[in-house]
Image (cartoon, rainbow, N blue to C red):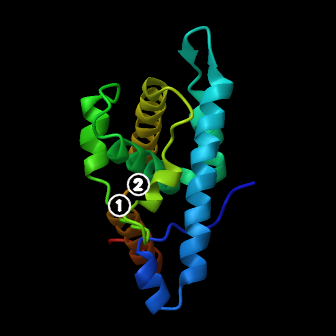
Amino acid sequence: MRDQTPLYHHTDSYAQEHGELDRYHASYQANIACKEAIERAIADSYRDNRLNIACVDQVLEQFGYERMLYVLANTVQQKEHDGRISHDNRAWAETVPVTSAPDGMGGDRNRYFIVDKCNTGLMDLFLTQARKAYALGQEKRPSVRESLNKNAGQQTNADRPIPQRTQER
């Protein structure tokens, strides 16, 4: 079953000030559940020194690209000194804004959704496959502009009267 919880992009203090703590907590719990699903998918799909790429689809079906990639970006950002993460994935992760989540004791709540119960190299392979799948999906989707132009062209053609042919004499 797909998790429909929207990703919350604000801090807990913002959520409290705006009466959105329920949304904040639901998103945070979904981030943790997504992290656990990624770890499970990797553990279930790693056999004979290979990671079955279908494991990405398993997490994608449950959480969607936005949350899955957010959790992975947070993981890479938190593991800034881990040399098992590729330069490409590290550079990508730096472009993803992950909302800071300081706790009252100087720690970071985002540490609770770091993918860390599997080998970091396998997490990096998973991330590479997830990014490729996302890019392929984006290439197949028409842009909003193309969709609007196509629909506008259909409407104008449909709204035009059909010209009557006259016989020339």
Q: Are marks 2 and 1 in contact (CB under 8 Å)?
A: yes
> In the displayed structure, does residue 11 sit left or right of residue 58?
left
Residue occupied by mark 2: 142
User: Which SS class for mark 1?
Assistant: helix
Q: Position of residue 11 (x, y in %)?
A: 41, 75
At 46% from the left and 91% from the top, the residue drawn is: 18
Residue 128 higher or lower than 31, as above or below:
above
At 59% from the left and 50% from the top, the residue drawn is: 34
Quadrant in the picture for residue 14: bottom left
Q: Position of residue 165 (x, y in %)?
A: 41, 73
Q: Is residue 166 visible?
A: no
Circle 1 crowding by C-alpha within 10 Å: few under 14, some 14–19, many from 20:
few
Q: How many marks?
A: 2
Quadrant in the picture for the N terminus: bottom right
User: Which SS class for mark 2?
Assistant: loop
> In the displayed structure, does residue 34 sit left or right of residue 98?
right
Quadrant in the picture for the C terminus: bottom left
| Kind of residue at disc 1 | Glu
Q: Residue furthest bottom?
A: 18
Q: Position of residue 9 (x, y in %)?
A: 42, 71
Q: CA distance from mark 2 to mark 1?
A: 6 Å
At 61% from the left and 67% from the top, the residue drawn is: 5
| Kind of residue at disc 2 | Pro
> Which disc number belongs to residue 146?
1
